[in-house]
Amino acid sequence: MNRPIAAQRLHNQRITRPGPRDVAALVSWLGAVQAQDYPAARWALALRMPAGATAATIDRALDAAQIVRTHVMRPTWHFVAASDVHWMLELTADRVQQKLAYAFRFYELDSATRVRATRAIERAVGGGAHLTRNELGADLARSGIAVAGVRLALMTIHAEVERVLCSGCQRDGQSTYALLAARAPKPKRLPRDEALAELVRRYFGSHGPATIRDFVWWFGLTAADAKRGLEMTRAKPASIDGHTYWACDAPRAAGAAVPAVSLLPRFDEYLVAYRDLDAVPRARAALGETVVAGGQVAGTWSASARGGDTVVDVRPLRRFTERERGALAAAAARYGRFLQRPIVVTRSGRLTRIPTVV
């Protein structure tokens, strides 16, 4: 493991250096935050914020359209700041559509059908409606558009990429869709080169040190795009362990020490935002809920309800030091505050010396 790289990434990603209290400002700093698993994505944001951020904090930001959830890249659901969504989609939409082309052909969603479906979706969420996916599907079916299987999902993704649709307010624990123009009514647009430079600056500032391959993997753009963006920024290259890494404008982490223990959710960007994972041993084998200690994957964890408590079960991949055990208890306590529930920590299903945290 390269400890300086691990330390700097944890620092820049705001895992060991708390980010802003404002949810949209944090999402904007990170560029976009992977969010196909909504509960996990909420924790990914909260653990990067100052103490006190809860699941409700993230819900309120989404309901207030400070952030939106949409297919802005690769194509996978991401949180993106409402102030960024228009220029970011303008930059990435063509690449997302290219990645969807095979699925469109396979499920017989030709251009005319996609246009027709997008117009029907726009009518359905017009006038301020917030509809669940099933409600949207029923509306499309009434318009004579087949929605079986994954066709509905593909049609909603297409409408998102076309900047018609995005996330609406949560309703009884369900996600809804709404009109993007209503959720982000003041589109900010940037010339392509300016948008590219901004995206490169944000990625290498918040995720660096990282490679060009990492950027291409994460945003789904091309290596030429990455190189062009780097030319327009103040990114500085460094050769480490035979790879060229880049970083932008981020304060340096203090030394190479990485003392914190973190309970990272599945799909956390510390593990999934990089094509090259040499700096984080075992990362490829631990893309679920992950215990990170000293910058490396040190175990996995899961959470389940038991009465009025939440049980956090930790499955170590190595022995924890006494200091790490204390840090793990603190991380579990923070997760409890996020959920607003008492926490009991177990090890591989058995109660441990790690204290119960209320």
Image: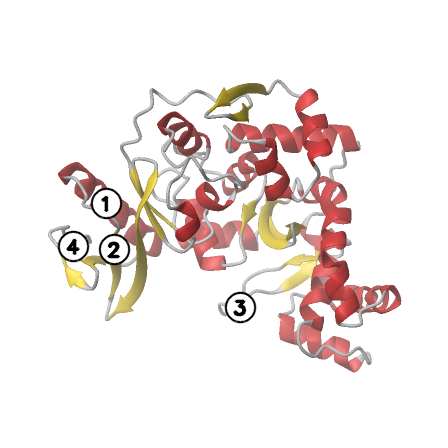
Q: What's the distance in space between the residues labelled 2 and 3, CA to CA?
A: 29 Å
Residue 204 is labelled as: none
To which residue does mark 1 refer? 328
Counting residues from the start of the chain, the first of labels 4 and 3 encountered is 3
Question: Front-most of 27 and 183?
Answer: 27
Left or right, 290 with reference to 91: left
Q: What's the distance in space between the residues labelled 3 and 1, CA to CA?
A: 32 Å
Counting residues from the start of the chain, the first of labels 1 and 2 encountered is 2
Circle 2: element type: strand
User: Which part of the image, by quadrant, shows the N terminus?
Assistant: top left
To which residue does mark 2 refer? 314
Counting residues from the start of the chain, the first of labels 2 and 3 encountered is 3
Q: Nearer the viewer, mark 2 or mark 4?
A: 2
Circle 1: element type: helix
Circle 3: element type: loop
Residues at marks 1 and 2 touching, judged by CB atoms closer than 8 Å: yes
The residue positioned 27% from the left and 32% from the top of the image is 259
Residue type for callout 1: Leu
Residue 174 is labelled as: 3
Question: Front-most of 258 and 344?
Answer: 258
Residue 309 pos. (x, y %)? 24, 64
Residue 339 pos. (x, y %)? 34, 56
To which residue does mark 4 refer? 356
Residue type for callout 2: Val
